[in-house]
Image: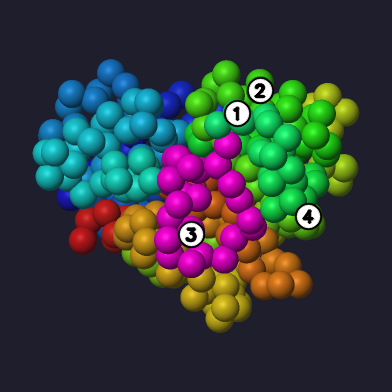
Amino acid sequence: MKIACFVEAYNFRDSSERRALSKFKSTAESMGHTFEFIYKDDIPAIKNYEALFIRATTDPSSSAYIISRLAEQYGLKVIDEPHSIRTCSNKAILHDLFLKNNIPAPKSLLFTGDYSTDSMDAIFKTLGLPVIIKTPYTRFSSHVEKANNETEFIAISKHLLRKSGILVLQEYVPSEFDWRVGMLRNEVLYLCKYCIPTGGWKVKSKINGRNVWGDTIAMPRDSISPELKEICINLSKCVGEGLYGLDVKETNDGYKVIEINDNPSIYDGHEDAMDTDIYEKIITALVS
């Protein structure tokens, strides 16, 4: 089968991601398929392929979404397909999805800019302080902020409302790491811990004026707890059968899902450090 892998130049800047992309290519070729990297200028040629694997950042305003829709229209097998991109890219949609399907998650509210006393009191009574503020479209912890008090909440939310007409407010759940569970076809593909860097509060934190990423600790996927596995399968099924990355907090009150992402990161020596067959499994999903 002829597989197109849609990428951008930035996908090759990090050596770990570059090596992972190389592994995808060599794995596909070892399985008897062709695997070609394509870019924005190649979008019209997508009809010449049989499957599309997207590695560039996705959201409904991106080139990746455009090629995903086009490929689906031409009947190609697509990872990730447009529905998954639309659903996972929008945290407001996920807010409703979690409520509708009883997905355990931190308490959250949607906010459109009502700063009345009653509104403020209701927010802090429900969510407490600190409170997390997100725009619907976030990637790699961007546009995700923490307000420690009402003054910070007003300043941060007003700034973010310039980017989006609606915000997601979420209860702050402190932790030393997030579980990252990779899912494919509603099965666990990989399992790891995304650690919170010392002095930070999210996986990518600004510390002393610079962005710092926490460590990634890979775990065997079979070591996942039955409870976490069930939650991840249930949520994955709510979205589709694509490739997803779920971020989950482990608390004294059980697991709390922060979000589900389409197009999850796969870096050589990180997500693949324990279960090295993830490349073969993804290629198999693309061609079957």
Which of label 3 and label 1 is nearer to you? Answer: 1
Please tell me which residue is depicted at 22% across the width and 45% down the height of the picture. Answer: 51
Describe the element under mark 2 as helix, strand or loop: helix
**Is residue 103 in view from this perspective?**
yes
Name the amino acid type tagged 2: Lys
Q: Mark 4 or mark 1, which is nearer the start of the sequence?
A: 1
- 151 on left or right of 28: right
Q: Mark 3 or mark 2, which is nearer the start of the sequence?
A: 3
Closer to the camera, 29 or 216? 216
Q: CA distance from mark 1 to mark 2?
A: 7 Å
Q: CA distance from mark 4 to mark 3?
A: 22 Å
Residue under label 1: 113
Marks 1 and 4 in Cβ contact (< 8 Å): no
Residue under label 4: 174
Q: Which mark is residue 130?
A: none
Marks 2 and 3 in Cβ contact (< 8 Å): no
Q: Position of residue 116 (x, y in %)?
A: 68, 31
Please tell me which residue is depicted at 21% across the width and 61% down the height of the picture. Answer: 288
Q: Mark 3 or mark 4, which is nearer the start of the sequence?
A: 3
- For label 2, the crowd category at 10 Å Cα-Cα, with few meaning under 14, some 14 to 19 and many 20 or more, is some
Describe the element under mark 4 as helix, strand or loop: loop
- 197 on left or right of 136: right
- For label 4, the crowd category at 10 Å Cα-Cα, with few meaning under 14, some 14 to 19 and many 20 or more, is some
